[in-house]
Structures are given as structure tokens and as C-alpha cells.
Image (cartoon, grey):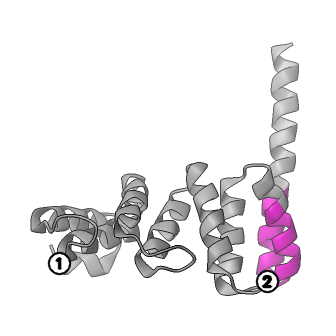
Amino acid sequence: MKKLIFVALSLVAGLLASDYVDGLNAYKAKDYQKAKELFEKACDDKDAKACLNLGLLYAKGQGVEQNYQKASKLWQKACDYKEIIGCANLGNCYIAGQGVEQNYQKAREFLQKACDGNDALACYNLGLLYKKGQGVKQNSQQTKTLFNKACYFGFQNACEYY
């Protein structure tokens, strides 16, 4: 019985993943409308990467009218589903006030989640908030720590600062 349940769950997971993979293939073929449809379907099924990529379509205006408000909502979903790049993108939206009201405290919250997940650019951007004292108390030691982490995870611009 356990084996049957595992097989059934594996098949369902494979079907859900195929919408995302098919969406990626459509995107690579520059069929953005098809990619949108497939990413929407997969995102509705709680596929974090599909939500992330659907948000990118809205941010770039590919196959849809550019809409940062929709992009930020999709990145919130992706972040809720533990996709760290969604958290990082949402944090950047809060810094820039794109699709959301500018809010450095919320930017810090989402960038921290992404940095904790080892996203190098998120660590760097979080470090910049500490360097500038935006949404947090200015803290040069925390800036250095975050830039060091960003460098360690491959963001070369951060390596120049620590």
C-alpha cells in the first residue's frame, strides 16, 4: 500500500513539474504567452519556481503587459513557497518601490530570508541597507559580514569591500 501511494505521489509530482519544465521550454523558444499559461498552471499548483518565473515575465513585460505589482505578488508567493530568489526579488521591489510601496524594513526582512538561503546578491543588497542605514541602524560590522558572505557565495562586487 505504501508503495502504491509513493508511486501515485511520484506521478502527480511529475505531472506538476512538467508544466514548469514545459513553461521553461516555451520561454527558451520565446513563446512567452505559452510560458505564461504553463507557469500560471504550475504556480497555481504551488510550484515555487513557476511563480518566480511568472513574476519575471510580468517584470520584463514578456508575453504580458509589464506589471511590477503582479510580479511582486508572484514573488511573494514564491518566497512563501521557500524560493529564495523570490524573496530576494521581493526585497529589491521594496527597496525600489516597484509594485509595492517603498519600505526598507520589509526589504530587509525579505533580503534576510534570501541571504539566509545563501543568495549572494541578496546578502550584498542587505549589506548596502546596513551601510546606508536604510530600514536598519547603520552598522559597518554587519555590512562587512554581509559583503563577506556575498563574496563567498560568488558576488564579486562584494569582494572589493571587505
Q: Is residue 31 magenta?
A: yes
What residue is rendered at 66% in x and 59% in y?
49
Q: Which quarter of the image is occupied by the C terminus?
A: bottom left
Residue 96 point in image, percent of width and height: 44, 81
Which quadrant would residue 40 be assigned to in this image? bottom right
- Asked whether, in this view, residue 67 is left or right of residue 105, the answer is right
Residue 6 position (above or below residue 76)? above
> Total marks drawn?
2
Residue positioned most to the front: 101
Magenta residue span = 19-40
Image mark for residue 64: 2
What residue is rendered at 68% in x and 81% in y?
67
Q: Earlier in the sequence, mark 2 or mark 1?
A: 2
What residue is rendered at 79% in x and 49% in y?
45
- Asked whether, in this view, residue 120 is left or right of residue 10, the answer is left
Residue 77 position (above or below residue 57)? above
* Magenta stretch prevailing secondary structure: helix
At mark 2, the secondary structure is loop
What residue is rendered at 11% in x and 63% in y?
141
Residue 12 position (above or below residue 45)? above
Q: Mark 2 or mark 1: which is in front?
A: 2
Name the residue type under label 2: Val
Name the residue type under label 1: Tyr
Q: Which of 106 and 14 is in front in this view?
A: 106
Residue 154 point in image, percent of width and height: 35, 70
Q: Mark 1 points at which residue?
A: 161
Q: How crowded is mark 2: few (under 14 residues within 10 Å), some or many (20 or more)?
A: some
Q: Which quarter of the image is occupied by the N terminus?
A: top right
- Asked whether, in this view, residue 131 is left or right of residue 61, the answer is left
At mark 1, the secondary structure is loop
Which quadrant would residue 31 be assigned to in this image? bottom right
